[in-house]
Amino acid sequence: MAPASQSRGDAESLGKAKAYVKSYGCQMNVYDATRMADLLAARGYAEAADEDEADLVVLNTCHIREKATDKVYSELGRLAKLKSERGAEGRDYKIIVAGCVAQAEGEEVLRRQRAVDLVVGPQSYHRLADLLTRAEAGERLAETDFAVADKFAALRRMAAEGKRVRDVTAFVTAQEGCDKFCSFCVVPYTRGAEVSRRPSEIIEEAEALAAAGVRELTIIGQNVNAYSGTDQHGAPWSLPRLLARLGRIEGVTRLRYTTSHPVDMTQELIDAHAELPFLAPFVHLPVQSGSNRILKAMNRRHDASFYLDIVARLRAARPDIALSSDFIVGFPGETDADFEATLELIRAVGFASTFSFKYSPRPGTPGAEREDQIDESVKSERLAILQTLVEEQRQAFNAATVGRTVEVLFEKAGRHEGQIAGKSPYMQPVHAMGGAELIGKTLPVTIVAAGSNSLAGRIAGRAIPNDAREAAL
Ligand code: 5AD
Ligand code: SF4
């Protein structure tokens, strides 16, 4: 059946089965997806460009909002069709569901979609190879055990073996899970309790990445600023201590961390922004709402002035720091006045970027039980108002970068010939004229223009072969 053209390919991938890992949701999922791709590669799978080309597909799912789960099931419907087409050709097609929907739904996924071969939760995917062997033998299984220590040990082994590096930026997990139990959120149920990795494991992984060419590390965790590691001498390590150590690794030019909770924003971490030159002046600090009443109902454990005080202290430590945040509109009981308080907080802070969502009741969370749910139409209206305001702030922030010279880490070729693209310290995409040899380098770039989604710059001290402004926008 296979046309001749399909048998072409590089010698290495010739004849190899191919796997495709498709990921939704947070940075933690991106990290897990990369690890699963590494595990599959170690098992002999070449990387497929998409699910059509693949013989095995992993959907690494997100459970945080309702639509995300619906999307998974409709995606699975599509993959099931693909699988039966393959079946008709006598070919195998494996479907694996991983991530937080896998954790939350477990065997329900197997019941609801017959085409799924394997369901594996975020705390169990390090056993993917064994599970796959059983799936290949015809078993249909759902593995959702929590065994965090094992997972971290597996990650450490992979770091020691040298993982495959794809980019000049990479995530490193420092912490996983959440003990906060915000009343809207499923994460404490799907990812389990807060667990911090040993500092030596994180450093080892970071060193392996840096040696392989990674220049920017983002230290991730559901509550990364609650990081509380213990070294082999029993000494405690906080996130700022870890950052100070990671910044000393040869080759690492920039560090970021995400996601943080306001109550864990210690003065030590705030001071780190003044003291560590390699720490990006950018903090993602979700606040969710500006109303004290709603913050309380959300079980966020702080009020609006607590948040504003952190922002003031961050700005005192590092005057050019930029902030981003997450917002939820339409939490049960949210009045017009509560919503207005959120807008007020946004005006008071001025965010460089934001993520905002309509409240989505998640089964099993206290918010979902409440009877004062807000109408969808009100949620939509509020979301539109909020998004207009934060979009104005984002554009203003980008426009204010024009004329400044900022450090850009170049990550890849740009969209146009002769261009390279990277990120400013504030996560803004920047492109400039320059050769591929500059990828992986951090260079001062004078921003010459702001487009709607990216900035055009000129590498400081270099002549521009074209008009960067025109080429770039
Ligand atoms: N509904 C809407 N948004 C949610 N988030 C988490 N749970 C919900 C929910 N049930 C948002 C929060 C969080 C981000 C990752 O997703 O803003 O910070
Ligand atoms: Fe969810 Fe709150 Fe934990 Fe963040 S802090 S993961 S929003 S429960």
Image (cartoon, rainbow, N blue to C red):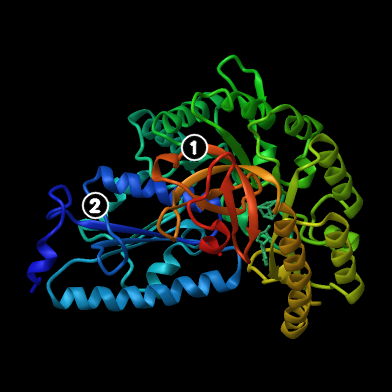
Nearer to us in this view, 452 or 143: 452
- The image's mark for residue 124 is none
In the image, taking residue 195 as reference, residue 361 lies left or right, namely right
**Image quadrant containing the C terminus:** bottom right
Mark 1 vs ligand 1: CB under 8 Å?
A: no
- Please tell me whether mark 1 sits on a helix, a strand or a loop: loop
| Classed neighbour count for the residue bearing mark 2: other residues with Cα under 10 Å, few (<14), some (14–19), many (≥20) | many
In the image, taking residue 134 as reference, residue 282 lies left or right, namely right
Nearer to us in this view, 208 or 216: 216
Q: Position of residue 439 (x, y in %)?
A: 44, 42
| Comparing labels 2 and 1, the label whose residue is closer to the camera | 1
**Image quadrant containing the N terminus:** bottom left
Q: CA distance from mark 2 to mark 1?
A: 29 Å
Res. 194 in view: no
Q: Is residue 180 above or below residue 317?
A: below
Pointer 1: what residue? 441
Nearer to us in this view, 369 or 390: 390
* Amino acid at pointer 2: Ala
State the residue at coordinates (9%, 72%).
3
Res. 247 in view: yes
- Residue contact at pointers 2 and 1, CB within 8 angstroms: no
Nearer to us in this view, 212 or 201: 212
Q: Earlier in the sequence, mark 2 or mark 1?
A: 2
* Amino acid at pointer 1: Lys
Pointer 2: what residue? 46
- Please tell me whether mark 2 sits on a helix, a strand or a loop: strand
State the residue at coordinates (38%, 31%).
157
Q: Position of residue 225 (x, y in %)?
A: 69, 39
